[in-house]
């Protein structure tokens, strides 16, 4: 069986930047998981003494708090600074942009609609920047019941599928006097999704490696599954089942934006050793 990696996969710019920031700020703690990969978070704690704090109020004056890649709620960021906490901002610039758009459009009187997962930390943060509130939707069906102003601003979670985003935009545009659609889906998401689409169309088994709570990994798995029925979402090599590879000729591999190269390589090594037996 041949193993082929997707043309684009794994760590994106924002994650690489956040990991570097964390490694340069030892004896600190991230507010919430820095990225959605528990193994990499364990490595940062073990090798760089960068811990994890889930409650922002636990930070005391003089503590060093690293803001996760997904960003945090505006009021919580202000409270950390007000309380004398040394804030190191590792928010991905691709996430900072929709925060700025939400605030600007809300202050200009637009109804702000955000396409994404309301429970995701990125969306909680973006929504908090909309001065007069924002509405979060996860599908075009949820848009149909909304009472919106004549002017609408549409923002997407950075890891969403562009096809789903366009469905919402196409619904809103003919029904309102002005609809401003902001392309806030990041370049790495486009590239990774296109790469896994191409690979999954020719592979007879697909592995998508990434955290089970990673939004962008789940999107990649969804695309793989559309094209290759035998697609599996795993976090690391411990979840592999060699029955998946029986009679298969091409195993395609992709990984979420928070998946480090060492985990991907461990998976490949484990498959190769298993097939040699």
Image (cartoon, helix red, strand yellow):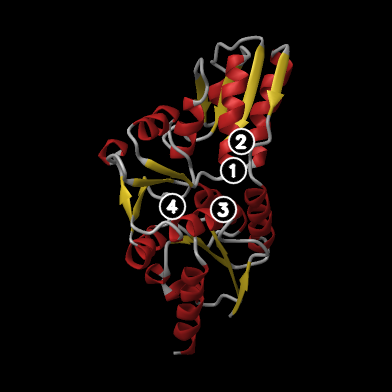
Per the rendering, the mark at residue 60 is none
User: Is 123 in front, or is 96?
Assistant: 96
On screen, residue 68 above or below 23: above
Q: Secondary structure at mark 2?
A: helix
Closer to the N terminus: mark 2 or mark 3? 2
Q: CA distance from mark 3 to mark 1?
A: 22 Å
Do callouts 3 and 1 mark residues in contact (Cβ within 8 Å)?
Answer: no
Q: Which residue is mark 3?
A: 220
Q: Nearer the viewer, mark 2 or mark 3?
A: 2
Residue 102 rendering spot, x and y as whole percentages: 58, 25
Q: Which residue is mark 2?
A: 97
Do callouts 1 and 2 mark residues in contact (Cβ within 8 Å)?
Answer: yes
Q: CA distance from mark 1 to mark 2?
A: 6 Å
Q: Which residue is mark 1?
A: 93
The residue located at (35%, 40%) in the rendering is 85
On screen, residue 66 above or below 180: below
Q: CA distance from mark 4 to mark 2?
A: 20 Å
On screen, residue 43 above or below 189: below
Per the rendering, the mark at residue 36 is 4
Please identify the quarter of the rendering in which residue 228 is found: bottom right
Do callouts 4 and 2 mark residues in contact (Cβ within 8 Å)?
Answer: no
Q: Tag 2: Cα neighbours inside 10 Å, few (<14), some, or many (≥20)?
A: some
């Amino acid at each position: 069986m041949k193993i082929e990696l997707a043309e684009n996969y794994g760590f994106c710019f924002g994650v690489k930047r956040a990991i570097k920031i964390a490694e340069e700020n030892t004896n600190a703690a991230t507010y919430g998981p820095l990225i959605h990969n528990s193994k990499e978070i364990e490595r940062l704690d073990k090798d760089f003494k960068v811990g994890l704090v889930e409650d922002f109020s636990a930070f005391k004056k003089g503590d060093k708090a690293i803001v996760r890649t997904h960003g945090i709620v505006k009021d919580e960021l202000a409270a950390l600074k007000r309380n004398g906490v040394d804030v190191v901002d590792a928010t991905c610039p691709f996430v900072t942009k929709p925060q700025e758009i939400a605030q600007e459009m809300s202050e200009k009187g637009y109804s702000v609609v955000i396409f994404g997962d309301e429970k995701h930390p990125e969306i909680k943060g973006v929504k908090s920047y909309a001065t007069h509130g924002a509405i979060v939707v996860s599908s075009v069906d949820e848009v149909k019941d909304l009472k919106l102003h004549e002017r609408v601003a549409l923002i997407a979670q950075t890891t969403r599928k562009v096809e789903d985003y366009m469905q919402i935009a196409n619904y809103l545009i003919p029904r309102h006097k002005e609809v401003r659609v902001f392309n806030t889906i990041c370049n790495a998401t486009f590239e990774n999704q296109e790469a896994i689409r191409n690979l999954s169309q020719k592979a007879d088994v697909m592995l998508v490696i990434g955290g089970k709570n990673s939004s962008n990994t789940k999107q990649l798995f969804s695309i793989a599954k559309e094209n290759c029925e035998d697609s599996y979402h795993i976090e690391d090599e411990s979840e592999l089942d060699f029955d998946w590879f029986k009679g298969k000729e091409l195993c395609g591999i992709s990984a979420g934006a928070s998946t480090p190269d060492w985990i991907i390589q461990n998976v490949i090594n484990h498959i190769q050793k298993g097939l040699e037996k």
